[in-house]
Image (cartoon, rainbow, N blue to C red):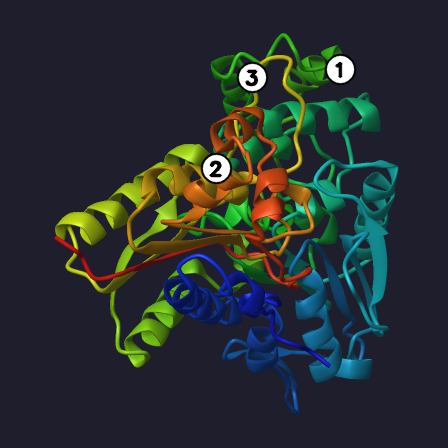
């Protein structure tokens, strides 16, 4: 049975600080999280017909000889696969998906393999090789339903010939620590792979492919969302340029530098006439749901953006300053008001010699916001819709106008925590970490700021 993602600790989070504003922001964030439910969206989109399968209003006729195969990997993939299992049942002839090692699953007719995230492993390479083997025998009468969602780059990661799993893992680690936007990260990863950049689609040809996915990238760019099964729009030269621009070229393993200058680094040309793609959930839909929830509760609501990207602490400061000005001066927005926004995953740039700390981009952004909100009537909720901000057990955090004062009373140095990227430790002590568990979706980071009435 599919269940919608939810914030589990609302009462605890609203039980201190500016409680009324916190609860309002959390309820609105919950509406956005519910709108990101990939499983129920897939249930609505897929059905059996007398002649085959209907997906998002498009009919796919099938003969008795036609095989239907489900493949995928990612944080929202299990929910989509479960919906396909429920709708199509025995009409699915074969299937394999990869999920995170800590994701809760139930038995399906489709095989569910466990792999690793955010850094790939031997398990990630093994499942990627099996995904290729699953689609390679298919013919023109067959249908592939591909469910690649955010996180698939690590969960199904097969290095090209001449590059080891360890070297590919080292590349991923360098990219994730660089602070580059996710589109640049994917530009590199697509060209150091045997499955990404449309290579799985090439292996499945001439079978028809339908992509069912959710957008976790600002701008909903398909080859940054579900790239194993759509046409790559970048080149190996682009990948080399990214590594040079971010001063990583000399740091990546020699095997990868050699590969990126070789003939197989560029992605294959696909027959896009045989590939359809359906975005089941987007950040736009999440923002619309949050605005509707705010207005239903009697609050004015403003959508700031659906394409936020950048350094986490800077994003936190930016949205907090807009809320602070509104609370303190009545501008740019007249309070009481709710500000909502979402975007691609924010990033954290690690300084040379700095290791990954316990925390995540949304937790960093929450502390940065708290430092700007001291003493004003604002509560901010910042969460990653997959439920695991920065690979931690928490989705993100809450901050308000009392956070800095409460931290001071506990002897917590929020600025130092932000500099060291160990944001989870002070937020745990403050009781401000948001818990959802693995949500089964991965759309965008969601931000809600409930701004109280200005006191002049």
Q: How many marks?
A: 3
Left or right of 216 on screen, residue 287? left
| Vertical comparison of 93 with 424: above or below | below
Residue drawn at (49%, 60%) of the image:
16
Residue drawn at (53%, 28%) of the image:
235
Q: Nearer the viewer, residue 156 or 197?
A: 156
Q: Earlier in the sequence, mark 2 or mark 3?
A: 3
Q: Which residue is mark 3?
A: 351
Quarter of the view holding residue 423: top right
What is the residue that sits farthest to the top in this orientation? 250
* Pointer 3 local density, CA inside 10 Å: few below 14, some 14–19, many at least 20: few
| Vertical comparison of 7 with 304: above or below | below
Q: Nearer the viewer, residue 71 or 352?
A: 352
Residue 250 shows up from this direction: yes
Q: Which residue is mark 2?
A: 408
The mark closer to the camera, 3 or 1, is 3
Dots 2, 1 in contact, CB < 8 A: no
Residue drawn at (72%, 65%) of the image:
78
Q: Nearer the viewer, residue 211 or 401?
A: 401
Q: Earlier in the sequence, mark 2 or mark 1?
A: 1
**In the structure shown, which secondary structural element does the residue marked by tag 3 occupy?**
loop
Residue 234 shows up from this direction: no
- Measure how far apart labels 3 and 1 are at the Cα level: 25 Å
Residue drawn at (47%, 45%) of the image:
406
Quadrant showing the N terminus: bottom right
| Vertical comparison of 346 with 81: above or below | above
* Pointer 2 local density, CA inside 10 Å: few below 14, some 14–19, many at least 20: few
Q: Which residue is mark 1?
A: 255
Q: Could you tell me residue 370's position as x and y percent?
A: 41, 42
């Amino acid at each position: 049975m599919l269940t919608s993602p939810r914030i589990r600790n609302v009462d605890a989070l609203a039980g201190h600080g500016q409680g009324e504003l916190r609860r309002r922001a959390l309820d609105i964030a919950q509406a956005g999280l519910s709108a990101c439910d990939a499983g129920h969206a897939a249930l609505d989109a897929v059905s059996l017909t007398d002649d085959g399968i209907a997906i998002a209003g498009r009919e796919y006729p099938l003969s008795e000889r036609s095989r239907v195969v489900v493949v995928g990997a990612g944080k929202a993939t299990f929910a989509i696969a479960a919906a396909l299992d429920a709708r199509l049942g025995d009409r699915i002839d074969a299937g394999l998906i990869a999920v995170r090692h800590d994701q809760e699953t139930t038995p399906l007719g489709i095989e569910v393999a466990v792999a690793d995230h955010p850094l790939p492993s031997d398990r990630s390479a093994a499942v990627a090789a099996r995904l290729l083997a699953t689609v390679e025998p298919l013919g023109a009468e067959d249908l592939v339903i591909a469910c690649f969602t955010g996180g698939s780059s690590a969960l199904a990661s097969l290095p090209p010939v001449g590059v080891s799993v360890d070297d590919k893992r080292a590349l991923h680690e360098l990219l994730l620590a660089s602070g580059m936007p996710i589109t640049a990260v994917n530009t590199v990863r697509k060209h150091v792979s045997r499955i990404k950049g449309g290579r799985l689609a090439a292996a499945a040809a001439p079978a028809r492919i339908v992509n069912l996915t959710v957008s976790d990238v600002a701008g909903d760019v398909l080859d940054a969302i579900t790239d194993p099964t759509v046409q790559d729009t970048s080149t190996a030269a682009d990948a080399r340029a990214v590594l040079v621009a971010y001063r990583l070229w000399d740091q990546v393993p020699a095997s990868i530098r050699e590969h990126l200058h070789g003939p197989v680094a560029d992605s294959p040309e696909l027959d896009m006439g045989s590939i359809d793609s359906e975005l089941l959930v987007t950040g736009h839909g999440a923002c619309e749901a949050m605005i509707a929830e705010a207005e239903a509760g009697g609050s004015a609501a403003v959508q700031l953006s659906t394409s936020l990207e950048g350094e986490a602490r800077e994003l936190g400061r930016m949205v907090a300053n807009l809320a602070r000005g509104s609370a303190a001066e009545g501008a740019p927005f007249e309070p009481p008001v709710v500000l909502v926004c979402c975007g691609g995953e924010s990033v954290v740039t690690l300084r040379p010699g700095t290791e990954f700390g316990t925390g995540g981009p949304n937790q960093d952004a929450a502390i940065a916001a708290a430092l700007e909100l001291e003493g004003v009537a604002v509560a901010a909720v910042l969460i990653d819709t997959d439920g695991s901000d920065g690979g931690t057990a928490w989705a993100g955090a809450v901050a308000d106008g009392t956070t800095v004062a409460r931290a001071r009373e506990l002897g917590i140095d929020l600025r130092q925590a932000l500099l060291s990227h160990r944001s989870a430790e002070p937020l745990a002590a403050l009781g401000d970490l948001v818990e959802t568990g693995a949500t089964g979706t991965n759309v965008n980071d969601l931000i809600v700021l409930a701004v109280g009435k200005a006191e002049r």
